[in-house]
Amino acid sequence: MIEVRDLVKIFHARGHVVRAVDGVSTHVARGEVVVVIGPSGSGKSTFLRCLNGLETFDEGHVVIDGMDLADKKTDINLVRREVGMVFQQFNLFPHKTVLDNICLAQEVVRKRSRQEAEAKARQLLAKVGIAEKESEYPSRLSGGQQQRVAIARALAMDPKVMLFDEPTSALDPEMVGEVLDVMKQLAREGMTMVVVTHEMGFAREVADRVLFMDEGKIVEEGPPDKLFSAPEHDRTKLFLSQVL
Amino acid sequence: MKQKTPTWPWTLLLGLILLTVAGGIWWATKRVDYTWRWNRVPQYFVYRAELVEHAPADGRVVEVRTDGDDAVVVFESDTGERTEIRVDVGTVQVSEGEDLFEGDPVGARFRWRVGPLTKGLWTTLWISFFSGVLGLVLGLVAGLARVSKNPTLRGLAILYVELIRGTPLLVQIFIFYFFIGTVLNLDRIVAGILALAIFAGAYTAEIVRAGIQSIPRGQMEAARSLGMTLPQAMRYIILPQAFKRILPPLAGQFISLIKDSSLVSVIAITDLTKSGREVITSTFATFEIWFTVAALYLLITSLLSQVILWMERRLAVSD
Ligand SMILES: Nc1ncnc2c1ncn2[C@@H]1O[C@H](COP(=O)(O)OP(=O)(O)O)[C@@H](O)[C@H]1O
Ligand SMILES: [Mg+2]
């Protein structure tokens, strides 16, 4: 489903050269749930954003469902409608109601009729448990509710892959659970997911594989049981001792 | 902390200051021996024009009768053609059986006519409106070019904005009228509107740029991650939000434009300012007319401010 080969992303910031992603290769199979962990600034977000072309990369290949992002002829908008993304800061459209947030891209990008889009939106709102909020504006919702709307908005495009960039990091602790529950349900339904998170409990429960990143590289990867209980590298051990 | 200072002393002070200013003006005009003639002003807004009706040919008055507020004079020319001439009752200058020569006055009608100040005000309004709309379009295009990734577009937009903002509007109007207007054979009104639009467009471009850049990056990223193209994201996500934020500065810009439009009077466009000047040459009510003109500008701009305030409140529902 996702094939990443020798991915390199370099930032030039104020004379510094930052190799944010430095030679990452990995493969995510259909229906697989991959959790990416690592210290702040290790390149997790940048890696994730390269997967849907929000960040252009300098070297390597990212192939999504057979479409190579490194190929200039690939229409990035076609790729993106197959790849849903959920952001740390929700990024809901503040000038649109919850329902319109979920309908807009369906109508504009997928060319669905308003009725079709609304039906889909209502079904997804029920799924994430906030059917009653459809005509509210995002600013009236709690963080947890906003993030669930954001998930519904991404799902409305019927993506083949969902990317999550620290979806619970901006939430008050009591709201983390409701968002993780939605994500767990998605994982159970067989969605292909790449999740950057600090929620080790979530990783343990639903991840098929955990990637540990540091300084732009995948230092270690493996099933959660193995990686959490018997990490091989010192850096992984150090990081886990700090977060667990 | 609980503190409650009474506001009435300050209100009183404000009143005192205003009274002093008014007194000062009164005293100053007293010193230059100016006689205020405010009663002369209204006729430059509307007046009753007298339209004299004349006999269409040599002939004779057959009949004079009244019909409501009109008097009807039935006139028969020497060749036997009958015409009915309607005039206001009380202005009839002929009687039945009287012989008339072509061009003799029969009577008159009084009609309300708009005066030069009303016409000037109207001209100012529509010139401002058209240059404002055109300026908005220009500003939107230039503002989008300004934030585009294409260096050519960006360069052009920067050049446009810097060129216009770095030179006085009066000079731009002259250049437009005498140079571009001559080369392209433009009407003075068109030249004036274009000059104002291009001027307003440059400032609007900066407002639009600032508005677009004030929208958090995450909004564009969310839109693009859903598969929207850049134009779609701009149209549905960025611009509607930016518009809400730029409405106040945009309104301020439009209010400035109304005031700046007074400069087109230098290329002989009879706007409010030019009308004021013309009226002064035929009366000697210099002070009254200038105060009236100022009050009219103030009236339009403050009405506009109210409209904008209302729109802002309407748009604020989602915040
Ligand atoms: N737009 C950018 N410009 C310059 N440097 C960036 C940019 N985005 C990220 N970086 C740098 O790239 C590195 C990786 O960042 P990021 O992917 O956000 O890490 P993480 O998500 O793991 O915290 C950091 O050193 C960060 O400073
Ligand atoms: Mg990050």
Image (spheres, coloured by chain):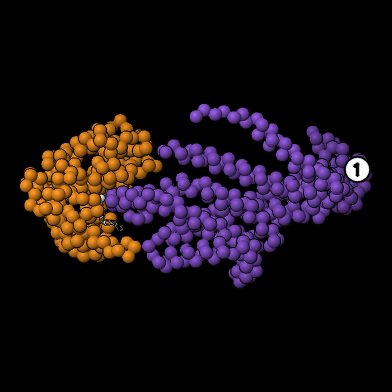
Chain colours: A orange, B purple
> Which chain does the residue under circle 1 lie in?
B
Q: Is residue A113 visible?
A: no
Q: Which image quarter is the C terminus of chain B in?
A: top left
Which image quadrant for residue B40? top right
Q: Residue furthest right?
A: B98
Of residues B44 and B285, the one drawn nearer to the viewer in this rendering = B285
Crowd class of label 1 (few under 14; some 14 to 19; many from 20; radius 10 Å) = some
Residue name at image x 43 percent, y 58 percent? B144
Residue name at image x 80 percent, y 51 percent? B286
Residue name at image x 19 percent, y 61 percent? A22
Rendered location of residue B130, percent (x, y): 58, 54
Q: Residue furthest bottom?
A: B183
* Three-letter amino acid code at the position of disc 1: Val
Residue name at image x 44 percent, y 37 percent? B317
Which image quadrant for residue B166? bottom right
- For disc 1, the marked residue is B94
Image check: B135 left or right of B72?
Answer: left
User: Does B16 sit above or below residue B159?
Assistant: above
Which image quadrant for residue B45? top right
Of residues B102 and A213, the one drawn nearer to the viewer in this rendering = A213
Of residues B279 and A25, the one drawn nearer to the viewer in this rendering = A25
Q: Is residue B89 visible?
A: yes
Of residues A155 and A151, the one drawn nearer to the viewer in this rendering = A151
Image check: A61 left or right of B68?
Answer: left
User: Does A73 sit above or below residue A89?
Assistant: below
Image check: B279 left or right of B77?
Answer: left
- The quadrant of the picture showing ligand 1 is bottom left
Rendered location of residue B205, percent (x, y): 49, 57
Rendered location of residue B165, percent (x, y): 55, 61
Q: Secondary structure at mark 1?
A: loop
User: Does B19 sit above or below residue B29?
Assistant: above
* Ligand 1 within 8 Å of the CB at mark 1: no
